[in-house]
Image (spheres, rainbow, N blue to C red):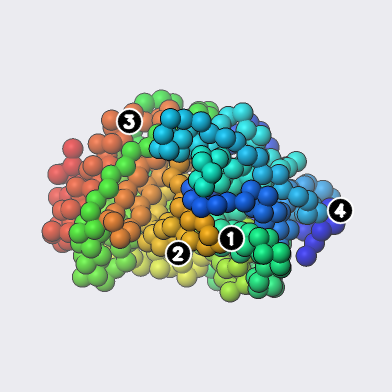
Amino acid sequence: MITDPDSLSPASHGQRSMWAFALRYRTANLNEMIIPWHVRGPLAAGAMQGALGDLVARHPTLRSRLSYQHGQLHQRIMPPTPVTLGVVDVEAATPAARLEAAVRALSDPDRPALDILNGPTFLAQLYRLDADEHVLCLYVHHGMCDGWSIGIMLRELVALYQARLEGRVADLPALTEQYVDVARWEQQAYDSGQLDDEIRYWRAELDGLPPPVALPAIAQRKGNRDWRAGTTHVMEPAAFLQGLRETAGKLRASPFALLLAALAVLLRHRTGSEDLLVGVPTLNRWSASAMQIVGYMTSMLPVRVRPAGALGFDALCAQAHTTIRKMLAYGRVPLEVLLRETALAPSGNTVFPIWAQFLEDSAGTSYQAAGLHFTPLATDRSSLLAELDVDMVGAASGWRCEFAYRSALFAPDAMHSMMLDYVGTLRRVMEQPRTTVQELTERLS
């Protein structure tokens, strides 16, 4: 484990993008991750503070920052230091009101900002709602953490907390790799030609790209740095989700392929384009050891869909399924390498104006350990780099779809109507999956 602050290790490709963004938009907080849990039970703040320090000591990326020296961008890992867990007493008349007040406080603009260049990149705050009820929130720079890392941090934090309470060393497996090792492999794989086959695939797949999708907007895009986000969502029952899965099975496609194909129909209707590129986040952890470490490994990769009018939806779904499978098969190539090696190019402030993902929710459930009950808290999206992010979750309770969008570019009513059109398209293809794309678009508002 590297603890010498003068030790420098290569930055990952993803971190290089984060660094460039931080230099260009020094006041932007788009890459801050806010990770809150509702904690019920007799929480010992001192033990939790100590456990947070142990967590940061175990995962050096949580105490790293980026440094440009000798013509290269490096990760500089700082020595472990105690973590300060600020405690705020929340006052309100009822427990529900106190919880609401704590959730609002999570995005307090006066909170110290995270800084990938100078630090800190990790902060923690505890909101006390009652003697046995708290909100614990971690703030982590996205360049040091991703969605998969959140589950690692919670599981290990609880184990470290329990060990603190019992005055012993936590029984956690030794880490054989750290994030700096992943970044080194990434660079070596590219330099040695290990990624050449993947790069050749992407060059062919991204050849002849059309202009980026441009949804009708209410403001100029060029130079617009207003990243405030608006959201609208819909919750459908478990029967709807089951219908999606059954239809996808009949079409021999994944549920996400079906969802993406329906989104392509909607985007074709709104933009007139029959050649679409959607950004899809992928896990990008290629070894068992990489699955155990905290770090920014998620990669946004392109899925190209061509919703020609004469195409049956079943054929479009098959096309999307094949493209997604190939994306995953050739997914070791970081987005930053694709920008260097293919025709892919940024569109405004991002590479993909449209993002989409579908998650089967098993991590969003409650977690009990060390005498405490942890429940993830949802927070409103305050900012967004993409123009539209279609975020879908399947759970035991049903299917949730959220359209997050840049509120400076799109009106709330228009985005809500677009989302309802999307749900309507899904209902129609579940009933008649061989309907043509043209017929589907003619039925949209």
Residue at 49% x, 54% y is 374
Residue 90 versus residue 143 in the image, above or below:
above
Which is nearer the N-term, disc 2 or disc 4?
4
Percent x, y of residue 222 = 49, 29
The residue to which callout 2 is attached is 327
Nearer to me, 221 or 355: 355
Which is nearer the N-term, disc 2 or disc 3?
2
Q: CA distance from mark 2 to mark 3?
A: 33 Å
Percent x, y of residue 210 = 41, 47
Three-letter residue code for mark 2: Met
359 lies left or right of 43: left
Percent x, y of residue 62 = 68, 53
Which is nearer the N-term, disc 4 or disc 3?
4
How many labels were placed on the picture? 4
Q: Is mark 2 in CB contact (under 8 Å) with mark 3?
A: no
> Which quadrant of the rendered structure holds the N terminus?
bottom right
Nearer to me, 359 or 36: 36
Q: CA distance from mark 1 to mark 4?
A: 32 Å
